[in-house]
Image (cartoon, rainbow, N blue to C red):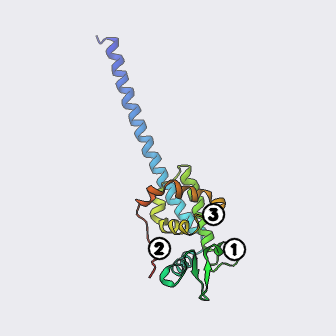
Amino acid sequence: MASAELIDWVRLGVISIGATVALVTYKSAQRQRKLENSLKLLELFHKNIEKSDIGNWKALFQSSSEPSGAKKGHFVSSYHQQVPLTSLFSEGPEDHGATVRITEQIDLICYEVLKNNIELRIIYSNLGQLMDVIYRWFGDEAFFKEYYPYFNKIMIKKKKYLSKLPSKTIAYCE
């Protein structure tokens, strides 16, 4: 007959293996859930912005570059004037509100990142250029920190991590 001690060791082994399998399964399910949530949020991002927003943002991005003649913190308007980038958050902006809508959607996505509900690398691989450029333009502005706190927090907290991730290029400066 098997001793009670041997039976206890066998039970411990079976329980340990069962707990390990359960933990691995749980982690895998969580990873899958975060991936699905990330893809759903990217889809929601594109539904919540207007069709012309990305095109308007591209034009603004290009007109805010040095080759287009823009000073730092400004863009060259359609009337060939230097306009501060902060004017994009006032009434009647040159980009027809595209930057505001994009920034609002990114802030909502960053809230979910902070709650650990989505995978930041998936979001950043699709929206990285938007996130980096918008943060570079407005990251030091008080209104940005106040009205887009989650976006601001992610860009500060995950700066090193984000710098190592690849991202899709939406627009080039020529």
Alpha carbons under labels 3 and 1: distance apart: 13 Å
Q: Secondary structure at mark 2?
A: loop
Q: Amino acid at mark 2?
A: Ile
Residue annotated with mark 3: 144
Q: Is residue 64 above or below residue 78?
A: above
| Quadrant assignment for the C terminus | bottom left
Q: Residue at x 64, y 78 (%)?
A: 96
Q: Residues within 10 Å of mark 3 (few under 14, many from 20)?
A: some
Q: Residues within 10 Å of mark 2 (few under 14, many from 20)?
A: some
Left of 16 or right of it: where is 152?
A: right
Report x, y in % for residue 141: 62, 65
Alpha carbons under labels 1 and 2: distance apart: 24 Å
Q: Is residue 17 above or below residue 114?
A: above
The mark found on residue 90 in the picture is: 1
Q: Which quadrant of the figure has residue 5? A: top left
Q: Is there a contact, CB below 8 Å, between mark 3 and mark 1? A: no
Q: Is there a contact, CB below 8 Å, between mark 1 and mark 2? A: no
Report x, y in % for residue 90: 69, 74
Alpha carbons under labels 2 and 3: distance apart: 22 Å
Pointer 1 or 2: first along the chain: 1
Q: Amino acid at mark 1?
A: Ser
Residue annotated with mark 2: 170
- In this view, the mark in front (2 or 3): 3
Q: Residue at x 56, y 49 (%)?
A: 115
Q: Is there a contact, CB below 8 Å, between mark 2 and mark 3? A: no
Q: Residues within 10 Å of mark 1 (few under 14, many from 20)?
A: few
Q: Is residue 58 above or below residue 117?
A: below
Left of 99 or right of it: where is 125?
A: left
